[in-house]
Image (cartoon, rainbow, N blue to C red):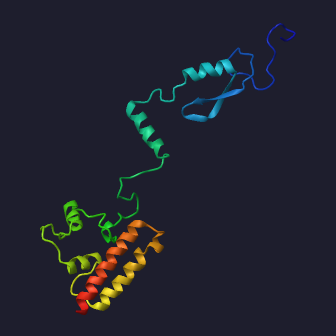
Amino acid sequence: MGPDGGRAKPRGRPCDVRGCKEEGQYRAPVARDKLDTYLWFCLDHVREYNKAWNYCAGRSDDEIESMIREDMVGWRPTWPLGQLGGRHAQMRFDRLRDEFGLFDDDDAASAGKKNGKSRTGTGKKQSAVDEALDILDLAPPVTPEAVKAQYITLVKRHHPDANGGDKAAEERLKLINQAYETLKETLNA
């Protein structure tokens, strides 16, 4: 207690509550739209202020939902998957090579290929040569030179050493080797 019988005067910044003689050690934002401007309170008054603080006061449910969604992406603009926003052109997925058939639109056709049936979904089993041509991504008629060139390209792309020992690449390489052997025997016969 001070000599005047009251509380001791604060040493630093005074509490911003009128009539409070305590030191304002704790800061709190003035308002939702002024988060970088502060009021300074003593411990008791900052507790009262925090109990009454509601950042979303006066906002509708839709505004709050929009604010939460924007906060989830760091307040950066977003757009639907598969589209590019602004000045950018839409990405062309049809130009990508799909060696494993991951992006086939027709699930039944890709399932049929795995079962040894043709891609057309007719249910007829492909011949070994047709299947080998599909694996090497070639269309008839083919020459031995074209088959060898495509084989070398695919081996370089799918070799496990070039893919960090990836098991999927190793399995794909086995199919490529079998397909090459099939076509080599057929073309040389």
Question: Where in the figure is residue 28, as x and y percent of width and height?
Answer: 63, 28
Q: Is residue 9 above or below residue 173?
A: above
Q: Quadrant of residue 31?
A: top right
Position of 149 with respect to 116 (left or right) is right
Q: Is residue 2 above or below residue 152?
A: above
Q: Is residue 110 above or below residue 153?
A: above
Q: Is residue 159 above or below residue 183?
A: above
Residue ID at (21%, 66%): 115
Question: Where in the figure is residue 172, as x and y percent of width and height?
Answer: 35, 71
Q: Quadrant of residue 171?
A: bottom left
Position of 166 with respect to 103 (left or right) is right
Q: Quadrant of residue 67?
A: top left
Residue ID at (37%, 78%): 154
Position of 160 with respect to 53 (left or right) is left
27 or 87: nearer the eye? 27
32 or 46: nearer the eye? 46
